[in-house]
Image (spheres, rainbow, N blue to C red):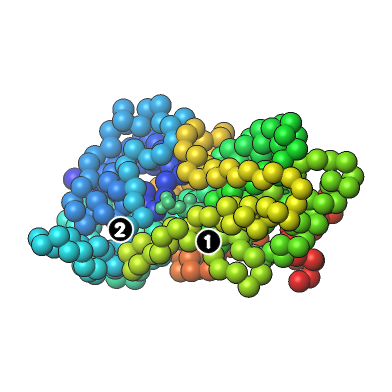
């Protein structure tokens, strides 16, 4: 009898912990079930372009500490809106899902483990509706998938952002400055909220709460009146003032999301001349996504990888592994995607921030 095979791909923006999932899937599928693992390169792009390889047990040794993904990833490979280059150099958008489904058949996989955020998992779910056997694993530093308490990658990003805020404190104090630290989070402000609270930021601005500039100015002024000559502002890239637009660096199109950027610069420009301090901006950007995952993310990635293989073995296709409390559960992909988990302006985290004197840019209940 031919050896059974499962496939794995990583899609969307990378994040720390992806390699822990790949390692766990390869070890458990090979060691416990005797299956061969096929790694598909660069997300659904590799499935379309026939770029895949067998993952040997040896190849995953030592992967726990490595950031990124050995399979590569892209956030421009939606099989339903795929950018195709024509011979004359023009780029057109095509639906290449039929080709992807054909390649999946050709690979004769038990199932494909798709590791990704909301975008990748939505694509996986749509391929599943057309017959593909898929199991999902939730990944994103943004922690904005509604069906799981935590995605891996988030904790590492929060650690990095918290350390940056810690470091900004000492230099802010030395120079009597207002330091603005911009973190990722286009729609959901989890990183800003978690790192801002853990790092003791004085102002935290998230996409879910459009901010009133006057409140930010007053927060800085209040500290000055109390004799504290510096302030730290943690702002999510997706934060915007009341009535203001999102700060966009490059507009998106059918094949790629808009690139955000400038939220901190814009706030700095608005603050300058309104406060007595100098203002400086630090944009953490992709530093938050790179490097070694924390122990939490390695562990979560490993648990997700093992659970995903067990879901395949149980024939529970069309499901995603999820962490609820401290238990791993399987949730239908259809319920896991489409609706992002956002910071609740009336929730406990925001209440905790306000209770400890953090300015969120709007009054409670606004
Ligand atoms: O979704 C993860 C994320 O890191 C967002 O927080 C951020 O807006 C986006 O990806 C950046 O994407 P890119 O790597 O394409 O610049």
Q: Quadrant of the C terminus?
A: bottom right
Q: In the image, what residue occupies the spot 27% across and 46% down?
A: 41
Label 1 belongs to which residue? 247
| Nearest to the observer: residue 21 or residue 313 | 21
| Nearest to the observer: residue 48 or residue 324 | 48
Q: Quadrant of the N terminus?
A: top left
**Which badge, 1 or 2, comes first in the chain's sequence?**
2
| Residue found farthest to the front | 273
Note whether 195 is above or below 75 in the view shown. Answer: above
Note whether 358 is above or below 282 in the view shown. Answer: below
Could you tell whether 267 is left or right of 356 in the image?
Answer: left
Q: In the image, what residue occupies the spot 17% across and 56% down?
A: 106
Q: Secondary structure at mark 2?
A: loop
| Nearest to the observer: residue 347 or residue 207 | 207
Between marks 1 and 2, how big is the CA–CA gap?
Answer: 25 Å
Could you tell whether 335 is left or right of 216 in the image?
Answer: left
Q: Is residue 346 visible?
A: yes
The image quarter in which residue 361 lies: bottom right
């Amino acid at each position: 009898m031919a050896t059974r095979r499962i496939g794995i791909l990583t899609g969307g923006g990378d994040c720390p912990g992806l390699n822990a999932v790949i390692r766990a899937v390869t070890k458990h599928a090979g060691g416990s079930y005797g299956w061969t693992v096929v790694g598909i390169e660069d997300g659904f792009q590799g499935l379309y372009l026939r770029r895949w390889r067998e993952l040997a047990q040896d190849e995953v040794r030592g992967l726990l500490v490595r950031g990124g993904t050995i399979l590569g990833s892209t956030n421009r490979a939606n099989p339903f809106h795929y950018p195709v280059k024509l011979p004359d150099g023009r780029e057109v958008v095509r639906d290449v899902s039929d080709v992807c489904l054909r390649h999946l058949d050709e690979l004769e996989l038990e199932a494909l483990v798709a590791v990704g955020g909301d975008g990748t998992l939505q694509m996986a779910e749509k391929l599943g509706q057309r017959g593909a056997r898929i199991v999902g694993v939730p990944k994103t530093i943004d922690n904005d998938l509604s069906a799981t308490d935590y995605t891996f990658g988030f904790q590492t990003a929060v650690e990095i952002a918290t350390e940056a805020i810690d470091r900004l404190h000492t230099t802010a104090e030395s120079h009597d400055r207002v330091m603005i630290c911009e973190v990722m989070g286009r729609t959901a402000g989890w990183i800003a909220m978690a790192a801002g609270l853990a790092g003791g930021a004085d102002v935290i601005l998230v996409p879910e709460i459009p901010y009133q500039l006057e409140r930010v100015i007053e927060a800085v002024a209040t500290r000055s009146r109390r004799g504290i000559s510096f302030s730290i502002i943690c702002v999510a890239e997706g934060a915007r003032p009341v009535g203001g637009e999102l700060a966009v660096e490059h507009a998106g199109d059918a094949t790629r999301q808009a690139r955000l950027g400038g939220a901190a610069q814009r706030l700095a420009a608005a603050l300058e001349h309104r406060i007595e301090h100098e203002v400086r901006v630090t944009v953490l950007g992709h530093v938050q996504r790179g490097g070694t995952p924390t122990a939490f993310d390695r562990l979560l990635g490993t648990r997700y990888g093992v659970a995903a293989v067990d879901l395949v073995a149980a024939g529970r296709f069309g499901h995603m592994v999820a962490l609820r409390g401290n238990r791993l559960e399987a949730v239908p992909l259809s319920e896991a995607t489409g609706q992002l988990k956002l910071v609740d302006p009336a929730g406990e985290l925001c209440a905790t921030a306000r209770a400890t004197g953090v300015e969120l840019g709007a009054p409670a209940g606004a």
